[in-house]
Amino acid sequence: MIDFLEQGIKKAFHFYGYQLVQTNVPSFYYFQKKENNNVYIICMLDDTVDSNIHPSFLYHGMEQVVSQFFPEQYNVYSLGIYVTNHIDRVRNITDNRWNRWILEASTGKIIIYENEPSQFLNVRTILEQGISGKIPRKKIPLTIVNTILVVLNILYFIVSELCGGSQNSIVMYKLGALQIGSFLENKEWWRLVASGFLHFGFSHLFNNMLVLLGLGIYVEKALGKVKYAVLYMVSLIGANIISVLWYQYNSNFNVLSAGASGAIFGVVGGLLYLVIKNKGRLELVTSKQLIIMMLFTIFHGITSAGVNNAAHIGGAIIGFFLCMILNNKHSF
């Protein structure tokens, strides 16, 4: 199949919740979707990849794929799609056990003969969208806890501005910023939380909230409201504790720390675990994209002044392992 056509179809099936399954035969693959006790399987055989492929192999492949679901007592619904530029080659080769459509690779035309179903679920729409490239964009709605966290950060930023400025160290300390030496001496534990909702300047706030809005919704949808709130707050407090210990170890007691990045890295670490658990993808985010983003952010921190990398790395580690616990079916 022409590459852009193939990629478009794969993206379209992914959008509608189908999982692509590659086989050890490059010209044969299938999409599957499970809903309760129902399994929907769309098998595709592409003879433009290998001209030696015989059309009957589509049916043999379908038989093998469908048979694996019988022991689990699923209701299996299947459709075969033969992709070719030689329509006459496949026209008269049929098997009454299986539904079959033909897709002409050079034109993207879907050919359905009279003895075949003209509609099969919404597969015709999926194919047409994949062929045309007009795949709807997946809209991810805002989630409750993540939105509340963003609003709280914004409101506290406004308070800091009204109280004398978010870049005024004295103002920030009074509102809860974490000053290492003072914290170790006075044990003001409330600063471990308050400092996570303060930001030094608008760009600091904007960058953190942009990441939180973009990624937090995935974790909240996967864990649920309560578990996501636990992940965020534990990552926030844990990252700040690690930060205090790190600066104490390095005898750097004058650091004034604030920002949600420790908690946000906890969210990123949790999301990384979820992506790995889901075999490399969670909705539109892949583990590769997450790792690149984390490494870039850490690199930016190392090469920039005033960035708390101890909180970043600590938050990511806490978030990863905490999500592993919270995502367990038997956790609260």
Image: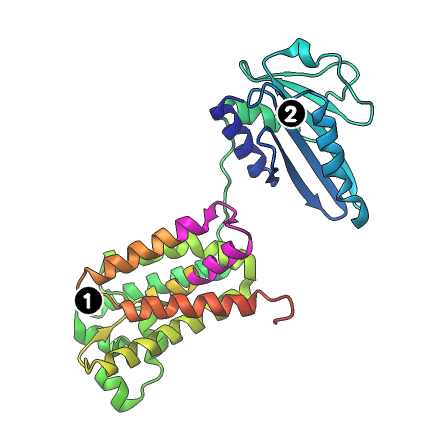
Q: Which residue is mark 1?
A: 306
- Looking at the rendering, which quadrant does residue 208 occupy? bottom left
Residue 104 visible somewhere in the drawing: yes
The dot on residue 124 is 2
Residue 74 image offset from top left, x and y in percent: 79, 45
Query: Does the stretch in magenta take in 281?
Result: yes
Q: In the displayed structure, would residue 292 be above or below residue 44?
A: below
Residue 48 image offset from top left, x and y in percent: 56, 20
Which element carries disc 1, helix, strand or loop? loop
Q: Earlier in the sequence, mark 2 or mark 1?
A: 2
Residue 147 image offset from top left, x and y in percent: 44, 58
Task: Name the residue type under label 1.
Answer: Gly
Direction from residue 197 to residue 62 in the image, left or right? right
Name the residue at the bottom extreme: 185
Q: Tell which of 213 and 249 is nearer to you.
A: 249
| Total numbered badges shown on the rendered structure | 2
Q: Which residues are magenta?
A: 269-290
Label 2 crowd (10 A; few <14 / some 14-19 / many >=20) = some
Task: Name the residue type under label 2.
Answer: Arg
Q: In the displayed structure, would residue 75 be above or below residue 212?
A: above
Which element carries disc 2, helix, strand or loop? helix
Q: Residue at x 41, y 59 (%)?
A: 268
Residue 210 visible somewhere in the drawing: no
Q: Residue at x 74, y 48 (%)?
A: 36
